[in-house]
């Protein structure tokens, strides 16, 4: 119940041979450094703008002044001095919580920053099914990896979304294959441990990282100013309160995951499924489902919504990504989400950042 879509998990990667490596997952630092090197060469040749990357520099406050009756960012107060902005547009591409703190301290008269908060809560379930049940003809190779994205909703409501990041692993020799397997596996949180693989040479292991949406309408979850902290770079306090809707979503996504393992992925039903109990490297396989307290992670991920985008009066950011409290300050990243949804956020962040860049620059033909 509640599952409305499944698909092969999309993964940002390069499959061509690069520097002798046949498969590489995408990561941003390398591209940023390559861009910096390219821009430095163009600038030196008089053909492009300069790009500076500054380290060991904390932005403490945005200095503002009224220009034609509207606040405008004019400089950055940093740990390495004041940086004038001139006519530049200021883009805050700094995650979800840090820009909320920065804007709150820089524009104290603007209300409501951080009153809305969402994130993903997580369950982690590891199971295994006999290989012979899934592969009676022994067609599997020595190392097989698969990943699926399974989307669902609780209570028939798209404001209670979750997804199952499902990895399937069959590894004949985990020690020998580990360098290849670690490079190909889709995510560190959806990967079997060495102990789980070594003890499952006759099984296919299923690793389920299950993410659910924290209720963004809950007044008990917020990221507001902390008057007890005098440091303006950290003076915010995060409170997360689980309400009834969150409990419904979490229960529904856990039950859906167990049911998929026991009725879809196991040809012989739940009696053939075993679950990992205990720490990843120190547990054991048992037929009983693990207790709720053992699978639910006690920390959220993918925080969002503190500077949500929209036309409503309570939305701090407009549809052009501009912070409504200033004429030249723009926001990108997970803080923009009106609600958390269930997707992993990176690809959407990239798309919105590209859209913002298009809006801020004049295209040339």
Image (cartoon, rainbow, N blue to C red):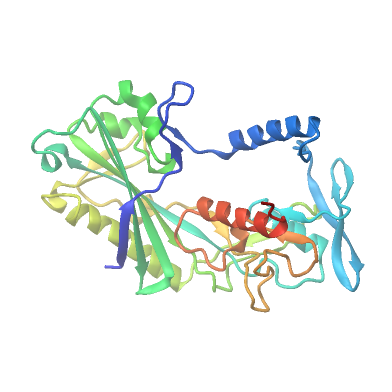
**Count of marks placed on residues:** 0
Above or below: residue 43 compared with residue 104: above
Above or below: residue 266 compared with residue 48: below
Q: Quadrant of residue 175?
A: top left
Q: Does residue 139 appear in this view?
A: yes
Looking at the image, residue 31 sits to the left or right of residue 128; the answer is right
Q: Quadrant of residue 21?
A: top left
Q: Does residue 228 appear in this view?
A: no
In this view of the protein, which residue sits in the foreground, 361 or 138? Answer: 361
In this view of the protein, which residue sits in the foreground, 279 or 348? Answer: 348
Identify which residue is drawn at 35% across, 60% down.
Answer: 151
Looking at the image, residue 296 sits to the left or right of residue 327; the answer is left
Looking at the image, residue 248 sits to the left or right of residue 316; the answer is left
Name the spot of residue 279 as percent of width and height, x first: 37, 39
Quadrant in which the N terminus is drawn: bottom left
In this view of the protein, which residue sits in the foreground, 8 or 219? Answer: 8
Name the spot of residue 14 as percent of width and height, x first: 44, 35
Q: Quadrant of residue 42?
A: top right
Residue ranking furthest to the front: 365
Name the spot of residue 219 as percent of width and height, x first: 58, 74
Name the spot of residue 47 as percent of width and height, x first: 77, 36
Residue ranking furthest to the bottom: 313
Residue ranking furthest to the left: 137
Identify which residue is drawn at 8% across, 38% down.
Answer: 136
Looking at the image, residue 75 sits to the left or right of residue 222; the answer is right
Identify which residue is drawn at 53% across, 56% down.
Answer: 348
In this view of the protein, which residue sits in the foreground, 165 or 293? Answer: 165
């Amino acid at each position: 119940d509640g599952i409305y879509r499944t698909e092969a998990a999309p993964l940002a990667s390069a499959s061509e041979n690069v520097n002798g490596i046949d498969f590489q997952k995408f990561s941003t630092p390398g591209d940023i450094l390559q861009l910096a090197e390219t821009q430095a060469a163009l600038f030196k040749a008089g053909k492009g703008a300069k790009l500076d990357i500054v380290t060991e520099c904390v932005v403490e406050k945005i200095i503002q002044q009224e220009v034609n009756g509207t606040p405008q960012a004019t400089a950055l107060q940093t740990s390495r001095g004041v940086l004038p902005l001139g006519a530049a547009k200021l883009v805050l591409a700094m995650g979800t919580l840090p820009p909320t703190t920065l804007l709150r301290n820089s524009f104290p008269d603007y209300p409501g920053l951080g009153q809305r908060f969402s994130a993903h809560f997580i369950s982690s379930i590891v199971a295994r099914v006999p290989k012979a049940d899934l592969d009676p003809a022994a067609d599997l190779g020595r190392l097989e990896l698969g990943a699926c994205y399974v989307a669902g909703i609780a209570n028939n409501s798209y404001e209670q979304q979750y997804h199952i990041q499902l990895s399937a692993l069959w590894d004949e020799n985990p020690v020998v294959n580990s360098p290849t397997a670690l490079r190909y596996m889709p995510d560190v949180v959806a990967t079997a441990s060495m102990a789980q693989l070594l003890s499952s040479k006759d099984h296919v292991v299923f690793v389920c990282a299950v993410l659910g949406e924290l209720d963004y309408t809950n007044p008990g979850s917020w990221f507001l100013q902390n008057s007890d902290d005098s440091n303006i770079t950290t003076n915010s306090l995060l409170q997360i309160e689980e309400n009834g809707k969150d409990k419904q979503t979490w229960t529904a996504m856990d039950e859906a995951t167990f049911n998929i393992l026991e009725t879809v992925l196991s040809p012989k039903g739940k009696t053939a499924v075993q679950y990992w109990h205990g720490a990843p490297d120190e547990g054991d396989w048992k037929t009983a489902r693990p207790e709720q307290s053992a699978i639910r992670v006690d920390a959220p991920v993918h925080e969002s919504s503190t500077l949500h985008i929209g036309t409503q009066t309570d939305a701090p950011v407009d549809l052009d990504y501009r912070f409504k409290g200033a004429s030249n300050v723009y926001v990108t990243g997970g803080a923009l989400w009106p609600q958390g949804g269930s997707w992993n956020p990176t690809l959407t962040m990239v798309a919105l950042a590209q859209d913002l860049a298009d809006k801020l620059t004049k295209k040339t033909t």
